[in-house]
Image (cartoon, rainbow, N blue to C red):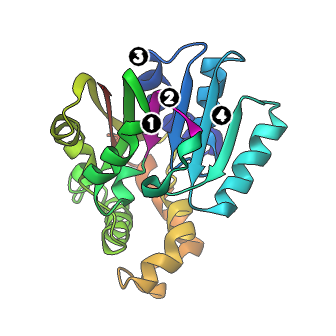
Amino acid sequence: MYQDETIKLLRNEFTQRLLADCGLEKGMRVLDVGCGSGDVGIMVAEMVGDSGEVVGFDISEDALSIARNAARKKHIPIVRFIQADISELPKNIGAFDAIIGRRVLMYQNDPAQSIDCLLPYLKANGKIIFQESDCMAASFHVDSMPLHAKVQNWTWGTVAKEGGNIHIGRQLYSLMKNAKLNILLTRAEAILHTSESGSDFGQVAKMMGPRMISQGVVTAEEISTSTLEDRLQLELSGSDTPFIRDMAFGICAKK
């Protein structure tokens, strides 16, 4: 079984290194785009310290409630979460030293326009930092780990049918160039499943199952989540190679 702390570490390690290497530091004012349940915003609040400030926004009030509770439990007063859309940000939130986002551009109808909407809130010489995923690894393991490859394709197929851009990772560079921004850093890294880490695809299938079925990507019989986790772990433990679960892309550009 994939350990919750292990997957959180894998997801957050790339983000933490990206933000640190892009120069996030004490005293900065940071805008967290599509903050969701607040994981990245809280991470950034710890980086900018008491002299800094983090404002996170999202359209989901349910996600914002989770974010606010998490910040309250961690006693982090410098982060606040507001309900807003990228195209309709309140003018009174001011300007920021950095604007960040993780897995948010992939769900925008027009990522280039979304970036344009954010730029007025970025200070001169401020940095815009995004992390996105890409489906480019989805065909690597069809023969060696067919069950993992199948669930991976179910996942990406569902995201695509819901309107998500499954190629956004490799498009980050051109998006920033077209926005007339100066590229400071680009990065891509494979997120791996191994027999030691286990697989989280059972959890993913359980969580996304209703969406997968409603989009016609898989039937209830095919997904069979009651045994899927065990079957995935058995396949992974019998393999002598890691499974590329995801490709993470990061970019930092300056106004």
Q: Circle 2 sits in a helix, a strand or a loop, which is it?
A: strand
Pointers 2 and 1 in contact (C-beta within 8 Å): yes
Badge 3 density bin: few <14, some 14–19, many ≥20, Cα 10 Å: few
Q: Which mark is residue 96?
A: 2
Residue plotted at (76% across, 43% down) = 70
Q: Circle 4 sits in a helix, a strand or a loop, which is it?
A: helix
Q: Quadrant of residue 190?
A: top left
The nearer-to-camera label among 4 and 1 is: 1
Residue plotted at (41% across, 16% down) = 21
Residue topped by disc 3: 21
What is the chief secondary structure element of the magenta stretch? strand
| Residue type, mark 3 in image | Asp
| Chain-order first, disc 2 or disc 4 | 4
| Chain-order first, disc 2 or disc 3 | 3
In this view of the protein, which residue sits in the foreground, 95 or 40? 95
Q: Circle 1 sits in a helix, a strand or a loop, which is it?
A: helix
Q: CA distance from mark 4 to mark 1?
A: 20 Å
| Residue type, mark 2 in image | Phe
Which portion, as a residue range, is magenta?
Answer: 93-102
| Chain-order first, disc 2 or disc 1 | 2
In this view of the protein, which residue sits in the foreground, 133 or 8? 133
Q: Quadrant of residue 58?
A: bottom right
Residue topped by disc 1: 121
